[in-house]
Image (spheres, rainbow, N blue to C red):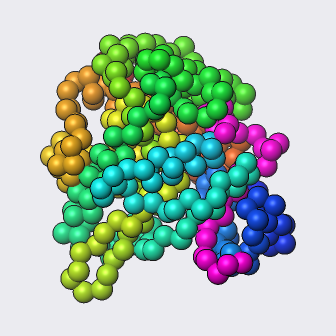
Amino acid sequence: MQSRTKRSMSPDELGALLHASMGTGCRVEGELTDGWFNTAYRVRLDDGRPAIVKLAPPADAAVLRYEQGIMATEAMVYHRIAGLPGPGVPAPALLHAGEELLVLSVLGGTPWDKAAGRLSPDRASALRRELGGITARLHTLAPDDGRFGYPAKESSLSAADWRTAFGAMVEALLEDAARWGSPIGVTPGAVRELVADGAYALDEVTEPRLVHFDLWPGNIFIDLPGGAGPARITGIIDHERALWADPAAELVSLAFGGDTGPAGDFAAGYTEAGGSLDFTDALRHRLALYRLYFGLLLVVECGPRGYGAEHLAMCRRTLAESITALRSSG
């Protein structure tokens, strides 16, 4: 996906940056073009190891408020995941974290979205159940300071309670929307009113947990062996959007890959691994608010990233549907 936030480098420039940051050079094997925010290259380090190098946007690139410093967020998540006991959360190993880049090990397998057409219903069901367990283990991670919101250094998008943090997150997107003239199709006042109406539901969330918030199938790698052998998840990538939040917010992006309802395979795996998903009216109202936030994010990011009219139209439909659903739920 083309985006103005992507940073292009020649092989020599990338090798020099990597050597200055990590003390080793590399041979560039190719650019990975599936990402939507950072630039990623597959390389061979001078010691022979294959690796993925992710580059932060250029320093002068226009980004949304929540996107400031999110490469450090991704590094933090990899560090926290690595410390989980037992089966944990499969992910690439973080080989190096610098101010401008991350260096990661190469995952085996294929992105789920690219393998979906080869999955039998039984294999897909088992994978959704496995994903539920992985997500439940991810949600055991909590912030050291007990605060909700985005963990980026000096972030103003965090607070001691979830209602305040979520409100600040929404306000930041509304400010970005005004800055970019984003066609959100509703007044800022109407958005604020919808959020205020859900305050009672947001106040039920008292313990922040790590939420990936971008668990669509393209960020989940799977191994799909030949024959009748079981498929398995080999890793989860792209943690830069992660935040300390209500675990139920994870269901927004997970819904792009399948059923996230109480009777589905994902919920079964989640509860088997110790997670709790009680689909009360309040939780369903919060989900509607999180879909509103996600819809706003999709529309507003089209401005700084320079996405085309067709993509913007899809994002506007997503936002409009979330607003209609939220108003109906009230």
Residue 326, given in percent of the width and then of the height, sits at 36, 26
Magenta range is 46-69
**Which residue corresponds to the image point at 39% horizontal and 67% vertical from the top-left?**
234
Q: Is residue 246 above or below residue 237?
A: above
Q: Is residue 125 above or below residue 280?
A: below
Q: Is residue 188 above or below residue 208?
A: above
Is 62 magenta? The answer is: yes
Q: Is residue 200 above or below residue 11?
A: above
Magenta region, mostly helix, strand or loop? loop
Residue nearest the observer in this picture, 118 or 32: 32
In terms of image quadrants, where is residue 43? Answer: bottom right
**Which residue corresponds to the image point at 80% horizontal and 44% vertical from the top-left?**
59
Residue 289, given in percent of the width and then of the height, sits at 40, 27
The answer to whether residue 14 is left or right of residue 298 is right
In terms of image quadrants, where is residue 146? Answer: top left
- Residue 32 visible? The answer is no
The answer to whether residue 291 is left or right of residue 123 is right
